[in-house]
Image (tube, helix red, strand yellow):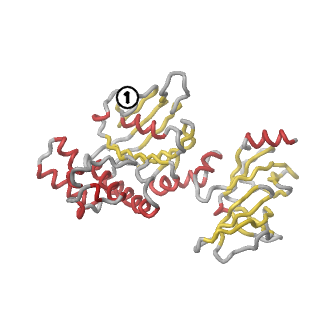
Amino acid sequence: MASIQAERLVKRYNPGAPPAVTGIDFEIADGEFVAILGPSGCGKSSTMRMIAGLETITEGTIRFDGKLVNEVRARERKVAMSFESYALYPTISVYENIAFPLRCRGESSVEIDRQVRQIAETMELAPLLGRRTKELSSGQAQRVGLARALIRRPTVFLLDEPISHLDTRQRYRMRQFIKSIHRDFRTTMIYVTHDQEEAMALADRIIVMSHGDIQQIGTPEEIYERPVNAFVAGFVGEPPINFIDGEVLVQDGEFHFATAGQSFLLPHKVQATPGRMRLAVRPAWLSLGSEADHHLRATHFVTERLQDHNILVVDVGRTRVTLLTDPTVVPQDGQNLYLRLDPDRILLYPPDRSQVAADDDDS
C-alpha cells in the first residue's frame, strides 16, 4: 500500500487558459479510503489522472510514500484504475478477463488459477467465470472490472465514477462490494464522484472540490455537520440544505437573525457579525413548533409522503424551505406553520453576492 502527498498541484491543459487544478495540497494515508467529490469540471478527474500518471503535472509534486513520482510512468506506479465504462474484452470469458493482468506479468498457470478463483469468490463471480462478458448484467460486468483491477494487487486503487451508470438498486449493492473490498484488501483507495451520497457512504475522508480548488477536506461527519462554506453546505446533503437570506441585527446587545419581516435570537455559540448573511439549516435540523414557541413562521406549500417520513415544503416569505417530519404530519395547503431550528446546528455564511446585487438594484 502507499501514502500519497500532493503539494501545490496544478494542471493546465492550454497555455494562458485557467487551470483545471489550481495548486492544491492534500495527504492520503496508507490504506485510507478518500473520495474526491465535486460537480462536473471541478478538477477531480484531472487530479486522479495526475496521481495515476495519465496526465503530466504542470506544477507541483506528487509523492508515494515520500518518493517523488512526477516522472514515474503510469505502468511503474503500481496503480490500478476502474472506470465508469467496464473496458472488458468481449470475446473472452470472465475468467480470462480477470486473469489477463497476471498473464501479462508472466505468472504460472497454477498461480493464475489460484488468484482468479480467490478473487472471484470475494466478488461473488465464481458461478460466472465461464461466461462471456456480453452475457453479464451491468452490475456483474462492473464487478468483473473491479476484480481485474484488484488482482494486480495495486498499492493505490483509483475508481472514477465506477457505478454512476447503474440503477439505484445496483448502485446500493455495488457500494457494499466496494466497501467490503477496502475492508478486506486495505488498499489505498481514491474514489472520484459527483454523487455526494456515494462519497458519504464509502469514504473515510472526503476532498470537496470546486473550480479546480479544494473547498474542504474532512470526514463525512465533518463535511455534513460543519461545512466550511455555502458551496460545501449546498453540495452535500439530501434533501438539500435550506438557505435563508436575511440580516444579522444587534438588539439589546444580542444578535438576531431577521428575514421576511420576522426575527429570532441567535444562540450565543453562533459566530455572527451584523449585516447581510445567509442562514443555512438542513431539513433534518428543523421541526414544527407552536405559535408560542418557534423561530420562524411559514406557510405550507406541499407535502411529499415517503412512507417512513414526510418532506414538508413550506414558504418563509419568498424562500422555499424543506423539513422532515413524522409520516402522520400532513398539513393543509396554505396552513400557517411554526418552525423551530436546532440551536446547535445553525450555520451562517456570507450573503449570495448575486442576491445582494439584485437587492441593491431593487432599492
Residue 73: image quadrant is top left
| Amino acid carrying mark 1 in the image | Asn
Residue ID at (34%, 32%):
67
Q: Quadrant of residue 60?
A: top left
Is 143 displayed left or right of 306 in the figure? left
Quadrant in which the C terminus appears: top right
Judging depth in this view, the residue of 115 and 14 nearest the camera is 14
Q: Which residue is mark 1?
A: 70
**Residue at the image position 29 percent from the left and 55 percent from the top:** 134
Residue 222: % across, % down: 56, 52
- Helix, strand or loop at mark 1: loop
Determine whether, in the image, residue 181 is placed left or right of residue 168.
left
Q: Where in the figure is residue 305, as x and y percent of width and height?
A: 63, 71
Please give the name of the residue rendered at 86% of the width and 56% of the height, measured from the top-left corner. 261
Q: In the image, is 108 to the left or to the right of 8?
A: left
Q: Residue furthest top?
A: 15
**Location of residue 69 with respect to 156 vertically, above or below:** above
